[in-house]
Image: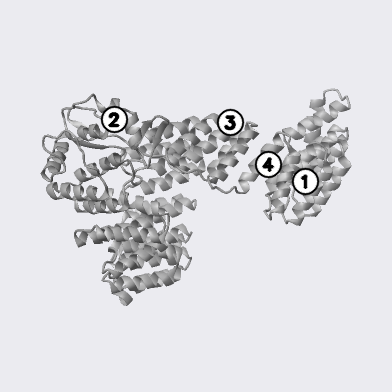
Amino acid sequence: MWVSSSIIKSSGLNQTKAFRYIWSRTFLFPPLPLYNPRLQSTSANKTHFASRHYASNTGVCSSKPFGEHSLNHIEVSDTCVETIRNVLIKHNWIHRFESEFSIDLDEYKVIRILDDLFAETSDASLALYFFRWSEFWIGAEPSTRSICRMVHILVSGNMNFRAVDMLLHLVKRSDGEERSLSLVMNDLFETRGDRKVLETVFSMLVDCCVKEREVDLAIKLAYKMDQIGIFPSRWVCISLLNEILRIHGFELAREFVEHMISRGRHLNAAVISLFISKHCSDGSFDKAWELLMGMKQQFGIKPDIVAFTIFIDRLSKAGFLKEATSVLFNLRLFGISQDSVSVSCVIDGFCKAGKPEEAVKLIHYFRPRPNIFVYSSFLGKICTEGDMLKASTVFQEMFELGLLPDCVCYTTMIGGYCKLGKIDEAFQYFGAMLKSGNSPSLTTYTLLIGACSKFGNVGDAEALFRNMKVEGLVPDVVTYNNLMNGYGKTHQLNKVFEVMDGMRCAGVSPDVATYNILIHSMVVRGYVDEANGIVNELMRRGFVPSVLAFTDVIGGFSKKGDFQEAFLLWHYMADLRVQPDVVTCSALLHGYCRAQRMSDAMVLFNKLIDAGLKPDVVLYNTLIHGYCSVGDVEKACELIGIMVQRGMVPNESTYVALVVGFEGKSVVNSEKHASMLLEEIFVANSSK
């Protein structure tokens, strides 16, 4: 219930005053906004019905409108209000000199008044205004039957978009129950007027089910419609068929097509294109090509540019760029001219495959009209390479050509700067995006949250996360992980757990990255045993932790000298067939070296080499530092020689290790000795 009578009375407003506000320009009472925030007048010649947010004695309450795109308020001129008043007088709902509205409204009277208003004015907006007001008057959500009649009036008055909002509301309210939607269908049928309007309304209802991903219900509704001699429109059938192919596959889709044909919905290129697209999605490009080539002979339908473009686009996305290019060049053999969309599909494929030179060749050959899609492809490639100066030049060029960058273009630029850690520049493009009227997507917010978290700006990440939810975007697991990572880096372990709780409440399942971040955050704070407990719990539940998770916990145990637990985890990795990488080995070796257990470290190192591990500079430097710290510079030099023989060049860390070793032996001018020794070892072993 949105507004109850008790709320109206408690705020000093009675029902008489409420209706008098609608049809009288001369208020007999003080301004109604003083009594109830739901009603407000902002000018001398317009009346507003305020949004569905109202103040009560207990705070601010709200109710969702009919569908996602309903206006938050209804605005009508005083002339329209006067028109409504005259119609009500004409049909004896009120008397001419009566200043009060004393009718006890119910759903049947509302429907009759709606019919009177539309019959007299042919203006669906007036009927809609009264319908919304009646909801306020009655103090409860409208009945399904009154909504259905309002839908018929809206369609009759060419306000289909409002009708769709109301039907979407009914579909959502049914919560996927067939019985509820069957009752809606019955009410729509019983409140019908014109048959053509009924056909349109039923088609809209099926389409709303498709939009809400209630595909099985949509199919059942379509067949129920058929029982009364009505079938969904051609384009609704195509929309439903696309979902049937996606969810149920070819068999049910073919049955539906046969039923379509039997009801006068003849095959066309759009229908067959859906089957071509499905074959491509399944990787059956040969079947897709066979169907494309057989359209004329089997069905008497000439393939159009849309059908070919779908095939070309799918080939390009699957990496078959040679084949896609071949089909593109041979389109003229089928009497079809290439358009900018078909050319852009292949250009995009080459850009994503890292072959911009091939994309440029196509542009020079076909000279397609500049479009956002082509520029998005090039921006993506340039930003991936990290050349943001060139990317910004290309971005500016779009404006010079009269093209307006869309959300994808702005997000690509933001992602490029985030990747380089240039957060200020990323936010500049974010601001420009908002000013341009483009709404940020989930990807936009996720990129910015990830960059802010990575570089320590967790406050900005929090603000972005909150704003994203206010905008109605639903965070996914990547978004949550990025925010968790920010809290982990700033050692806010309690916040990390809060985010995980938020994920569970939102129905988002943690993935491998989520547990990696959680375990790493705990190890960094010193909660190694607790992190190990999470690893063990994951294994107990049949979930195989990643190498990163094992590495963090092994490193934590090694750091505090608990090699028994570290090796136990090492063996778990072998049992689970998780291959340790260089970083894992380095964590364990580093622990031995810190504990000055160099013999154990060397035994482990040799075992790793025998197992096929290829050590890197970091791993060698770990051992070199260990030997130098215990004064065994000779062994350290031996390892440096082996490292050089295997093609690795000593670095600053190697040099520092030798300096520490010489200082431990009280060698005078240890820096010079370390530098000379490194040079000798490198020269002696580089030729081997």
* Residue 328 percent coordinates (x, y): 37, 61
Using the image, determine if residue 406 lies above or below residue 185.
above
- Give the foreground label among 1 and 4: 4
Q: Which residue is mark 1?
A: 645
Depth-wise, is mark 2 or mark 3 nearer the camera? 2
> What whole-number distance in Å separates the C-alpha atoms at marks 4 and 3?
19 Å
Q: Residue at x 77, y 30 (%)?
A: 656
Q: Are marks 2 and 1 in contact (CB under 8 Å)?
A: no
Mark 3 lies on residue? 456
Q: Using the numbered discs, state the Cα–Cα distance from disc 2 to disc 1 in whole angstroms.
A: 92 Å
Residue 213, position as x, y percentages in the image = 42, 57
| Marks 2 and 4 in Cβ contact (< 8 Å) | no
**On residue 13, which mark appears?**
2
Q: Does 658 sit above or below residue 186?
A: above
Q: Considering only order in the chain, which callout, 1 or 2, is on the residue closer to the N terminus?
A: 2
Q: Nearer the viewer, mark 4 or mark 3?
A: 4
Q: Amino acid at mark 3?
A: Gly
Query: Considering only vertical position in the picture, is 190 above or below 520?
Result: below
Residue drawn at x 25%, y 44% is 105
Q: What's the amino acid at mark 4?
A: Ile
Give percent across and percent down for residue 625. Answer: 80, 35
Local crowd size for mark 1, using a 10 Å CA cut-off: few (<14), some (14–19), many (≥20): some
Q: How is the image coloured?
A: one colour
Q: Are marks 1 and 4 in contact (CB under 8 Å)?
A: no
| Mark 2: amino acid | Leu
Disc 1 residue type (three-letter): Gln
In the visual, does 324 lie left or right of 418? left
Disc ID at residue 519? 4
Which is nearer the eye, 228 or 365?
A: 228
Q: CA distance from mark 1 to mark 3?
A: 41 Å
